[in-house]
Image (spheres, rainbow, N blue to C red):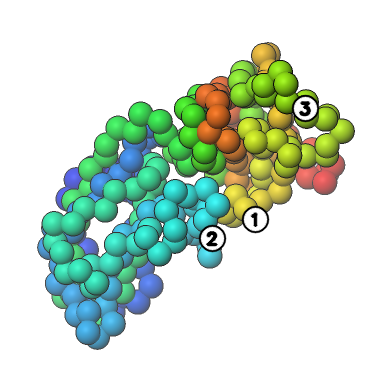
């Protein structure tokens, strides 16, 4: 995993058939990856591909539901274009390269840059603790903030679009926020695909004041779903759970 900008070269000492490099930036950054030099044999089955997101343990982040592009457009394969100057730009603060080379001495070089993203969406946190404000400004989209640690999350403020006074109000008896166009959900799981994670809490109404929840899973996600009619905003902070807290959570199943 690489967190820095620069020019990086991989040279194979032996056949490497299943390899990857992961790139991560700050939450407010996206990643640009440009092929600077490539010496591989595409006809023999070698490849170098940039992926918009992360592919980890058979799961994708962001999920197909949350990414703005279809899966087929999230890859930039050098062997398809042979274009050394084509830069792949991620939609979020993570990207990756996966590659296969058969011959010793095969190599490729990429240049990695980080660019500012004014409205970050679909983020993997670099740190175990911190705080963040996620804003979706009149966009019909879903955004997630993923923390790959068991953590306690404290929601400090949640501002969701209100319905028109003439609209029928949402009923609190609904067991989830499935009927709401704008909501936040807290998810937990052991993978990175939000569509395969377990719902811990659904929040369909704006709130002021702290709301704390502990999630003892390998991955904790704050996910906001937006209809595009409003400006939605959630501010939260998070910290890692200590061993005693984790044991208590596991004891309570």
Residue 224 appears at what percent x and percent y?
59, 35
Task: Give the residue at x 52% y 56%.
Answer: 64
Separation (CA) of disc 3 from disc 1: 32 Å
Q: Give the mark nearest the N terminus, 1 or 2.
A: 2
Whether residue 117 is situated above or below residue 190 in the rendered picture? above
Task: Give the residue at x 67% y 14%.
Answer: 208
Separation (CA) of disc 3 from disc 2: 39 Å
Farthest right residue in view? 173
**Quadrant in the picture for residue 252:** top right
Of badges 3 and 1, the one in the foreground is: 3
**Quadrant in the picture for residue 115:** top left
Q: Give the mark nearest the N terminus, 3 or 1.
A: 3
Farthest front residue in view? 166
Residue 142 appears at what percent x and percent y?
54, 41
Residue on which disc 2 sits: 59
Residue at disc 1, secondary structure: helix
Residue on which disc 1 sits: 196
Residue at disc 2, secondary structure: strand
54 with respect to 212 (left or right): left
Residue at disc 3, secondary structure: loop
Whether residue 186 is situated above or below residue 63 in the rendered picture? above
- Most foreground residue, 120 or 111: 120
Residue 41 appears at what percent x and percent y?
19, 80
Whether residue 39 is situated above or below residue 120 in the rendered picture? below
Separation (CA) of disc 1 from disc 2: 9 Å
Q: Residues within 10 Å of mark 3 (few under 14, many from 20)?
A: few
Q: Are marks 1 and 2 in contact (CB under 8 Å)?
A: yes
Residue on which disc 3 sits: 168
Q: Residues within 10 Å of mark 1 (few under 14, many from 20)?
A: some
């Amino acid at each position: 995993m690489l967190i820095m900008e620069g020019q990086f070269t991989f040279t194979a000492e032996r056949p490497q058939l299943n390899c990857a490099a992961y790139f991560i930036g700050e939450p407010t950054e996206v990643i640009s990856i440009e092929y600077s030099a490539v010496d591989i044999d595409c006809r023999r089955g070698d490849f170098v591909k940039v992926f918009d997101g992360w592919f980890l343990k058979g799961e994708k982040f962001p999920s197909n539901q949350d990414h703005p592009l279809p899966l087929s457009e999230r890859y930039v394969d050098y062997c398809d274009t042979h274009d050394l100057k084509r830069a792949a730009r991620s939609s979020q603060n993570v990207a990756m390269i996966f590659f296969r080379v058969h011959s010793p001495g095969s190599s490729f070089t990429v240049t990695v840059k980080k660019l500012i993203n004014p409205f970050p969406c679909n983020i993997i946190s670099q740190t175990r603790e911190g705080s963040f404000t996620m804003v979706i400004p009149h966009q019909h989209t879903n955004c997630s903030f993923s923390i790959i640690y068991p953590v306690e999350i404290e929601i400090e403020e949640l501002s969701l679009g209100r319905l028109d006074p003439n609209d029928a109000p949402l009923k609190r008896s609904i067991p989830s926020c499935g009927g709401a166009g704008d909501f936040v959900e807290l998810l937990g799981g052991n993978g990175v695909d939000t569509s395969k994670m377990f719902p811990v809490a659904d929040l369909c109404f704006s709130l002021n004041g702290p709301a704390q929840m502990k999630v003892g899973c390998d991955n904790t996600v704050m996910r906001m779903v937006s209809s595009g009619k409003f400006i939605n905003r959630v501010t939260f902070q998070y910290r890692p759970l200590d061993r005693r807290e984790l044991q208590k959570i596991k004891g309570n199943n």
